[in-house]
Image (cartoon, rainbow, N blue to C red):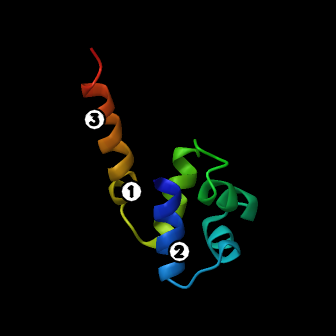
Amino acid sequence: MLSDKIRGIRIIQGMSQSQLARRSGHAVSTIHGIENGDNKNPSFKTICDIAKVLEIPLNELYQEALSKKVVNANQRP
């Protein structure tokens, strides 16, 4: 999931939620909500800002989510 990837990469980089929030220009509550799954639909800008701070390409964050959507779409009758 997107939330797990963001949390995992942030932790590997030794960054706290408040550091990520400050560097990305978003509130700690926004980062917390994304990582805990409370915010299941963060804005594209927010995700871009987070990806930039974490120095990871957007497609790496969304790869798993997009693959699941394709699989689900292909299962429709």
Q: Position of residue 66 (x, y in %)?
A: 34, 43
Q: Closer to the N terminus: mark 2 or mark 3?
A: 2
> Does 77 appear above or below 68?
above
Query: CB atoms at circles 1 and 2 under 8 Å apart?
Result: no
Q: Closer to the N terminus: mark 1 or mark 2?
A: 2
Callout 1: SS: helix
Residue 26 sits in quarter: bottom right
The C terminus, quarter of image: top left
* Disc 2 packing (10 Å; few <14; some 14–19; many ≥20): some
Q: Nearer the viewer, residue 26 or 30?
A: 30
Residue placed at 33% from the left, 54% from the top?
59
Callout 2: SS: helix
Q: Which mark is residue 10?
A: 2
Tag 1: residue type? Leu
Label 3, on which residue?
71
Callout 3: SS: helix
Tag 2: residue type? Arg
Q: Which of 76 and 23 is in front in this view?
A: 76
Q: Closer to the N terminus: mark 3 or mark 1?
A: 1
Left or right for 67, reference 44: left
- Depth check, mark 2 against mark 3: the one in front is 3
Query: CB atoms at circles 2 and 3 under 8 Å apart?
Result: no
Q: Residue 58 carries which label?
A: 1
